[in-house]
Amino acid sequence: MDFKRGIIMPNTTALLPSLIQAVANAIENNAIELTELDQAIGDGDHVTNLQRGIQTLTAQSNELSQLDWQAALQKMGMTVMSSIGGASGSLYGTLFLAMSKNLNNQPLTLTTFADVFLKGVEAVKQRGKADKGEKTMLDVLIPVAEQLHQNANTPDVFEQIKQTAITGAESTRDMVATKGRASFLGERSQGHIDAGAKSSQVMICAIVDALSEKSTTPP
Ligand code: ADP
Ligand code: MG
């Protein structure tokens, strides 16, 4: 165990089935709210898109847990890209594929995860030609990636990330959408949280909670 780190991560892909299950449960538990958000300023398919991808990942869970992180992230990227559909499919696919590519052969620790997650989010920005402040999932992903990168070694980083994700999703409420379907509404998109930002927040919080249960803080 590395006592220099704030949090000690169990870092094998044997984690993946339980993380995928945690994400599946969280989306299921928030399905009604997320669908209403996508109906308000999108086309209402966001939850079914995500669930299609999550079901395929669940079916691949055992296989994924036999791979190393680089191969698992690559397989997840391809799966998500082809099964989710919609804008979010290609964006989450890009995230996982870029994380895999940047991980190269390094072992996955919280520090290397923070590094490749930041690079993955950078790839999502390029793929979607979008940035913070445009009322998308990036309003959660960017601040979370930056915070994780800066504070990966602090003991309460998981709690900080959850708060940042919640604040990021909430911040989209007053924004005018300039990317994705919601941008067709212009100023009428104001007053609603973006569905993709909210689902990112829900998934990040679910992953953090699942990891917290499995991690130990050094004495
Ligand atoms: P679609 O918009 O094709 O129906 P989804 O409903 O699955 O796809 O996903 C919509 C979400 O995707 C939006 O709520 C937003 O968060 C995100 N999104 C859309 N376009 C972009 C973009 N260019 N960059 C980043 N995120 C985007
Ligand atoms: Mg949609």
Image: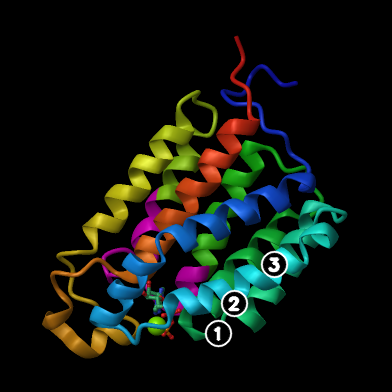
Write down the residue under mark 2: 52
Indicate the quadrant where residue 140 lies.
Answer: bottom left
**Does label 2 or label 3 sit earlier along the sequence?**
2
The residue lying at 85 percent from left, 56 percent from top is 67
The N terminus lies in quadrant: top right
The type of residue carrying mark 1 is Gly
Residue 75: give x, y in percent of width and height.
76, 68
The C terminus lies in quadrant: top right
Write down the residue under mark 1: 85
The residue lying at 58 percent from left, 41 percent from top is 210
The type of residue carrying mark 2 is Arg
Residue 136: give x, y in percent of width and height.
34, 70
Residue 61: give x, y in percent of width and height.
76, 60
Secondary structure under tag 1 reads: loop
Q: Is residue 131 left or right of residue 5?
A: left
Decide if residue 178 is in sight here. Answer: no
Specify start and end residues of the magenta stretch as a single range.
Answer: 124-143
Magenta run includes residue 125: yes
Label 3, ligand 1: CB separation under 8 Å: no
Q: In the current view of this chain or complex, which residue is farthest to the bottom?
A: 184
Indicate the quadrant where residue 159 lies.
Answer: top left
Towards the viewer: 119 or 54:
54
Q: Is residue 44 left or right of residue 16?
A: left
Q: In the rendering, which numbered label is found on residue 57?
A: 3
Q: Residues within 10 Å of mark 3 (few under 14, many from 20)?
A: many
Q: Are marks 2 and 1 in contact (CB under 8 Å)?
A: yes
